[in-house]
Image (spheres, grey):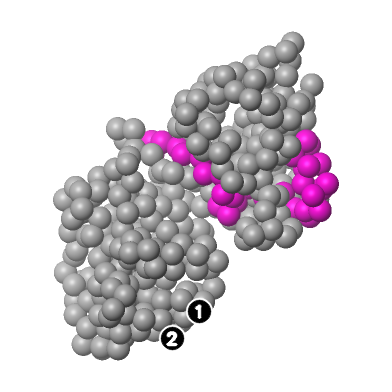
Amino acid sequence: MIETWNDRYGDEVIALWNESASQDGYKEMTAESFRATILNNPYFQAESAFVLLEAGRAIGFACGCTGDDLPLGHAAGYIACVVVAAGHQSDDNYGKLLGALENRFRRLGKTQADFWFFNPIRLPWYVPDTPGHEHNNAPGVPVGSRLHRYLLERGYAQRVQQYAMYLPLQGFSVPQDIEDKAAKAEADGYEIALYEPDRHTGVEDMLDALGNPLWRKEIAGCTADGVPVVIAAKDGKAAGFAGPVVREPSGRGYFAGIGVHPEHEGHGLGSVLFFRLCEAFRDIGTEYMSLFTGEGNFAYRIYEKAGFRTVRTFAVMRKGL
């Protein structure tokens, strides 16, 4: 039996999460963190969350969300999680929960179901082989998990893999070849520094040229609100960014991305921006950084050079409805 969300299932679903989702590396939930992460999310709707019951007890939980203002929101329903209790992880039970979500999306006029990082419900997970270091979002399905295998059988296409990369920042230093690139960029007329509103212009124009809606919203918001962002500028006009420089309560350095305006590529700005960002995090006492990069992303080489290693792999998946 499947029912839509009701708060009376809260304790059972949290216990289910802590038993089963934690096996795939997700962080445990408390009543407070479950409410903050899922129930209080502005995109959460009880009609898009489902509890699978057996003998009146919760043995499965699935949650999705929609929003026309989300990237691809006019077409996509986003699936945040599908969790089934150990001993009940059958194709039938996964199918019941996924079917309920897919039918909900169809009723809302959506034409695809996505596991993707555009999902605004952000589920934290632990970085393996670390002292409890965590990342604040899962951009897809853990590769090799029971759910991943089932989705492939159900007709979900794996669009791309996202590599989770990690670096402890104690002892981080900028190598000489990056310092040489910085000197050359400076000789070419570029400044790389923290954004200052009275000295730098053109941030929104740069973000428009990069064409990433998440960056457009977040980085523009950070510069408007005084949150530090490392930028490259020429004649005072923004040519690239890395950041923001935000230390999370967990000790992690929050990372939205790195980008260089197409008109300013070829000057080594991306590498210099990223290393300056790592340096800025180290200087404010950040313990570590973690980030995602997709298959074939040029930035992968930059992250590797900085000392990052791949710690987990997630699959971005989609099914047409």
Q: Which mark is residue 263?
A: 2
Quarter residue 181 falls in: bottom left
Callout 2 amino acid: Glu
Q: Residue at x 37, y 49 (%)?
A: 290
Residue 5: x percent and y percent?
A: 69, 29
Asked whether, in this view, residue 123 is left or right of residue 170, the answer is right
Q: Residues within 10 Å of mark 2 (few under 14, many from 20)?
A: few
Marks 1 and 2: in contact by CB < 8 Å? yes
Tell whether 91 sits left or right of 131. Answer: right
Q: Earlier in the sequence, mark 2 or mark 1?
A: 1
Q: Decide: is 70 above or below 20.
A: below
The residue closer to the viewer here, 204 or 164, is 204
Q: With respect to residue 8, does 288 lie above or below?
A: below
Which residue occupies 65% across, 28% down?
Answer: 61
| Residue 209, numbered label | 1
Q: Report whether 23 appears left or right of 196.
A: right
Q: Which residues are magenta?
A: 99-128
Q: Quadrant of residue 111?
A: bottom right
Which residue is drawn at the image coordinates 56% and 43% (left, top)? 41
The outermost residue toward the top is 55
- Rendered location of residue 60, percent (x, y): 67, 25
What quarter of the picture does the N terminus occupy? top right
- Looking at the rendered image, the disc whose residue lies closer to the viewer, 2 or 1, is 1
Is residue 102 in the magenta section?
A: yes
Q: Is residue 152 magenta?
A: no
Q: Is residue 227 visible?
A: yes
Q: What residue is at 71 percent from the left and 39 percent from the top?
A: 48
